[in-house]
Every structure is written in C-alpha cells, then in structure tokens.
Image (spheres, rainbow, N blue to C red):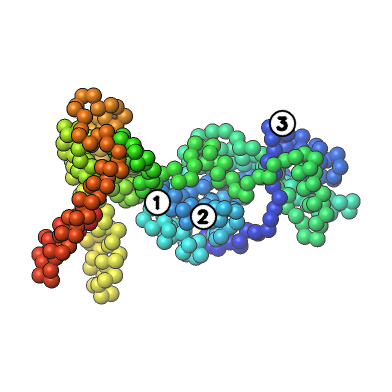
Amino acid sequence: MVGVIPMIPTMKIPSYLLPSSLTPDTLLKTLADRFELREETARGIERVYLDTFDWRLYQGGGVLLAKQTDGHLALILEDRDNGKPLASCLVDALPEWPADIPAGTLRETIAPRVAMRRLLPLVRLRSKVRLVRLCNEDQKTVLRLLVEQPRCFTPEGRALGELAPRVLLVPVKGYDKPLRTVAEVMEKELALDTAPASLFLPALACVGRHPLDYSSKLAITLDPDMPAEAATKVILRQLFDTLVANIPGTKRDIDSEFLHDLRVATRRTRSALAQIKDVLPAPVVADFKQRFAWLGQVTGPTRDLDVFLLDFDRYQQSLPAELQPDLLPLRDYLLRHQAEEQQALCRKLNSPHFHKLLKDWRAFLDGVSDEHPVAADAALPIKRVADKRIWRMYKRVIREGRAITPTSEPAELHELRKSCK
C-alpha cells in the first residue's frame, strides 16, 4: 500500500534520557509505588536515516527518516532543528531516488534538493518500545509512557551498541494533571535530562559520523604569514581527501556526482600546481601535473556520457511531441556506452598505476621536501605570494578584456574566459 499518511502530531511531548544508573525496570518500579501502571505488549520499531553523500537534505534544513512499525513503512521528513515532521507518506521500500517516493508533498519537497543524487542509508536503529498506561482510580488511562531502548546498527546491519534509553510522556486529552505530576517526578525527583527531539544526531555519533562531514567545497582558513609551501600543502591535502572520498562511489557508480566531485578535485589540484608557482619543487610539480592530467583524461569519457544522460529529458522535451519517442533508441545507446566506459574506468581506478599515484601524492603532501631544492618562494608568507599572483592575473584579464571587440574570434573569448576562471 502506498499513499499519504496523516501528519504525526506536533504537540510538545516531554521526553527524558535514562542514565546508566537507572534502568527502565527500576524507573517503572519507582513510578508503580505511587501510580497505577498497566503495561501493554512491547512493540518493535526500526528507523533508517537517509541523505545524499553530500548532505543535501540536511543542508536544506531536513532529516529524512524511514520508520517501520507494525508492518508499515513511513517516510518522514523532519525539521533538523526541532524534529517536527514536515511531510510524510507510506512506502513499500527504502527509496533510492526521489522518483521512488509516491507523488505528493514529500517528493515535491525533497526532489529539487536531492536532484541527481542517490539517497543513501546513514544509520539504522532498532528499538524495543514498552507502552505503559497510567490509570486513575476508575481504571481510565490518564497518561501513556513510552519506554524505548534504541540499538544502533550500520546501514548494512552490523550491530554497534545501544543508545541511552528514553521515556516519552504522551498526554491524554482532558488529563493535564497526571502529565504535570509525572513530569515533576522525572525532572525534580529523578533529575533526568531532557531527551533530544530526534534520535538522528545520537545515532550518527554511534556510527562515528556527524552532519556535513563531507563537502566538495573548499573551506580552509590560512594564516596570512604561513609559509607558502605549507599553506599550499594544506589546500592540496583537502583536495586530495575529497578525491579519495569519492573513489568508492565512483567505482560503484552510485550516482554521477561521485565522479563529478572526483574530477573537480583533480582539476583543482592541477590548477593549483600550475597557478601557485615557485612554491613547490619544480620536479614534483612537473611529475604530478602529468600524472593528474592522466586521471583527468581517463575519467572524461564516463563523465561526458553522464552529462548526456542527465540532460537527456531536457533534450527530448525540446523536440515536438510527435518526435520525442524517436530519441529513445539514443538513450538506450548512451546507457550501454556509459556502462562500457564505467567498466573501463573501474579498471583504471583499480590499476597499480592509479594506486601508485595516490600513494606517491600522499607521501609528498605528508612529507618534507628534502629530496629536491627548496623552491624560490616556498618560505615566503602565503599572502605575499597570493597577492602577487592575483595582481598578475587581474592585469592579464583587463588586458585581454580590453582587446575584445565585436569581431573577436571565439578563441580569444575562450582565452579570456580561462583567465577569469
């Protein structure tokens, strides 16, 4: 069954964490000494949190949760700050792409943000939830307690450990006093800490991750007085880490952005080697410029086909409606060709040649330059080197720009564009 499900209530539900010194059984025994408790059959809940490799949903303010209870799998988009549900629907299985989500508010909300990226499981939680009813003298339920013990697993299902148990107080309409009374016991007598609104961050921490732990964007703060060689290596290390992070996803062809980010990191590395002159040893620069150029070349054919396929719908829709089906054989051809090029790329990325490039580059970035003469500007402050290069490029752009006329050749415009980049 697939369809829209009612929104989860957004009322404030008091929830508390149990310390290691207070087990759920001990807590319930303490409450049973002063309240009438009736425990129902325990239920199992499984949660899977999902996002793209580069955290597109989290960056947009959301957390995507797949929650399975009593045989129903609900997909819920929560507000990342307060855990409140923003949209939800029932699904048959974990979605991999926005198109796998039933049409409706949820898909319309996340599809533009996710775009061409695949949704990946980040962490799994399996919980035993005990439902305990607090009854009055008439045996009417006046408050419900949900006692949950979450266990954390990797996306593949490997057990990691338990999170702290938590207790939720679910009010019953018309019975506010029992809620206040039990909450006072929790907060004042037992001094329990308030539980976070969502299990997302504690679950991520359990698998050793945190939000935004990957980004393809350069986010580096350099000391202006830092030696130019050391500063350049800081930049190159981050680019290298980005490149390496995208290798597994590129090999598995999880989505096209893994290869894209790998190529961007490669291109930026080559650009840094070319633009930051007289800072790194010349033999090293010459060697690795050539080797990273090879990486750019072997990844190019697959990326070109990825771009064709990503834009195929736009190309097709640009044609008259009666001609659009005629492009379908081209899509089949592109898919077959992309699969062939992807296999060839995997062979290159598994080759000793590529592994040696990674090993040698890491050794250079982490080592000291004692095998080659120190470059002329290696010890200069990075700001001084950068200012000099920026000023030189600025003057080139102005000179080339002023030379452009209405009759300029395309090659001249291309050179200006490259200088601006």
Total count of labels: 3
Mark with earlier residue (1, 2): 2
Q: Residues within 10 Å of mark 3 (few under 14, many from 20)?
A: few
Q: Nearer the viewer, residue 297 or 8?
A: 297
Please provide percent x and percent y for residue 101. 47, 58
**Distance Cα–Cα, label 1 vs label 2:** 16 Å
| Residue 421, numbered circle | none
Mark with earlier residue (3, 1): 3
Q: Nearer the viewer, residue 414 or 401?
A: 401
| Residue 118, numbered circle | 1
Quadrant position of residue 386: top left
Please provide percent x and percent y for residue 65. 53, 51
Q: Residues within 10 Å of mark 1 (few under 14, many from 20)?
A: some
**Distance Cα–Cα, label 3 vs label 1:** 42 Å
| Residue 62, numbered circle | 2
Query: Disc 1 on helix, strand or loop?
Result: loop
In this rendering, does residue 49 appear at all?
yes
Labels 1 and 2 touching (C-beta < 8 A): no
> Which quadrant, please, contains the C terminus?
bottom left
Quadrant position of residue 285: top left
Please provide percent x and percent y for residue 264. 28, 48
| Left or right, 266 with reference to 20 | left
> Which quadrant, please, contains the N terminus?
bottom right
In this rendering, does residue 254 appear at all?
no
Residue at image mark 3: 21
Q: Amino acid at mark 1?
A: Arg
Q: Is residue 393 above or below residue 249?
A: below
Mark 1 or mark 2: which is in front? Answer: 2
Q: Amino acid at mark 3?
A: Ser
